[in-house]
Image (cartoon, rainbow, N blue to C red):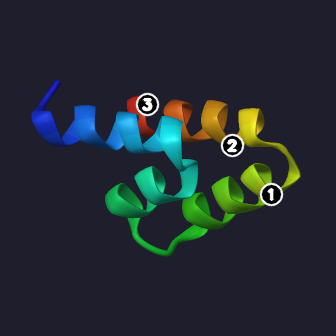
Amino acid sequence: MSTATVVEIILAILLPPLGVFLRFGIKVEFWICLVLTILGYIPGIIYALFVLTR
């Protein structure tokens, strides 16, 4: 696990779409994470961590 991955995971916990954006840019993963975060903060975190560690 690199330093960049650790930073992305920390950002995914604080602000889930930002962590996903740093890895994938504005692609479908970002939009899914954004919608899940708007609907509920915890689902956004879970999805972001899943995508970043997958």
Q: Could you tell me which secondary element the residue under label 1 belongs to?
A: helix
The image quadrant that residue 25 belongs to is bottom left
Element at label 2: helix
Q: CA distance from mark 3 to mark 2?
A: 15 Å
Q: Quadrant of the C terminus?
A: top left
User: Mark 2 highlights which residue?
Assistant: 44
21 left or right of 46 in image: left
Dot 3 or dot 2, earlier in sequence: 2
Q: Are marks 1 and 2 in contact (CB under 8 Å)?
A: yes
Task: Work out how far the residue at label 1 is from the one at label 2, CA to CA, in angstroms.
Answer: 8 Å
Q: Is residue 2 left or right of residue 36?
A: left
Q: Image point 87% across, 52% down: which residue?
A: 39
Q: Is residue 26 toward the left or the right of residue 34 in the image?
A: left
Amino acid at pointer 1: Ile
Residue identified by numbered label 3:
54
- Mark 1 vs 2, N-terminal side: 1
Whether 25 is drawn above or below 48: the answer is: below
Which circle's residue, 1 or 3, is located before the other in the chain?
A: 1
Residue furthest to the front: 14
Which residue bears the numbered disc 1? Answer: 38
* Crowd rating for badge 1 (residues with CA inside 10 Å; few <14, some 14–19, many 20+): few
Q: Quadrant of the N terminus?
A: top left
